[in-house]
Image (spheres, grey):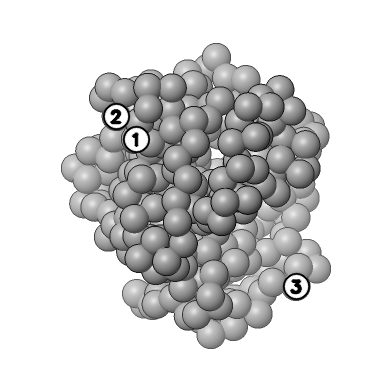
Amino acid sequence: MILVTGASGRIGANIVRELTQHGYTVRAAVRPGTTRIEKLAPFKPQIVEADLTDRARLATLAEGCEAVVHNGVIFTGDPEKMVAGGLEATAILLESARRAGCRRFVFISSTAVYEGSGYRPGDPVREAEATTELTGVYGACKLASEALCSAYCLQHHLPTISLRFPMVTAGAELLSHGFLLETWVNRIREGEGAQNPSWCDAVHRAWENGQRIAVPLNRDGTAWKRHFCDVRDAARAVRLALEAREGYGLAMNIASVPVRYDVAAEALNMLSQWTTAEIPFPNEYRYEFSLSRAAELLGYQPSIDAPQMILDAWKGRQHQEVAGLIAP
């Protein structure tokens, strides 16, 4: 039995799918009263309700389980709640797993542990570059939780592995990250970009000219490049971490392949026949994460390439079924 927290979310549900399809029995921990458990029905997990701030409930959650995948988190603007549902919940679940004699604890972390990595024209971002000088409580909670996982591995011999995901997308979600001009038009309408009127004017002109695909440009004229993680790759990495024979106590980057916005625009043009607008942007993105540690220790390699991600995102936008994916 594998305990999966946050099991009704887009990442958690796909983890449940991946594990059950590979023969594992899953205990799916979901937020009390959630209406999103229908997506889990085909995989027949054991459904349990557990609030991440309910210390007594969390303390017994791993009983009868051989491993834990801690994916749940409370993401909020309230720092106190984020600490309670993040760092404190992780601490309680680690102790629950230790007392239950679990053979593995997989913690779902985030590339939010890297500060200022959005524009990196040089080498990929490596795990050792995580910093305690973080400006976000979310990233700080993730990094502190990783440290707890490592401590439980070293002191209590509980094999732990932390997986750092960047932005995880499922199907049509990818397109909401600035690949379509409508995203930027809507954000401007909501008040974004007030300090950059020239950028706002460029977006509006392109929209009025009938252009619908966006290629944001960095200051040096290059197209944005961002490193996303398709949720199917994320789920497969979790399974590999559960099955790994090394890498305990470590954190590892997990992602699909970097996506260049100009290359994505070509694919979207072929699918939609829409035209493209290249627009200089006030903020910059050009980065990728090193996946070499996960490749060496987990045998992980991305299985979803950029063209497939774009095609599946377009299918999702058209409300078509995407193979191997539980949509949000």
Instruction: Please provide percent x and percent y for residue 215.
Output: 44, 43
Tags 3 and 2 in contact by the CB under 8 Å rule? no
* Residue 15 sits above or below residue 22 on the image: above
Q: Amino acid at mark 2?
A: Pro
The residue depicted at 57 percent of the width and 62 percent of the height is: 10
Instruction: Please provide percent x and percent y for residue 196.
Output: 66, 25
Q: Quadrant of residue 9?
A: bottom right
Instruction: Please provide percent x and percent y for residue 22.
Output: 34, 74
In space, the residues marked 3 and 1 are separated at their CA atoms by 36 Å
Say which residue label 3 marks: 35
The residue depicted at 34 percent of the width and 35 percent of the height is: 288
How packed is label 1: few (under 14 Cα within 10 Å), some, or many (20 or more)? many
Q: Nearer the viewer, residue 227 or 12?
A: 227
The answer to whether residue 181 is left or right of residue 54 is left
Say which residue label 1 marks: 288
Tags 1 and 2 in contact by the CB under 8 Å rule? yes
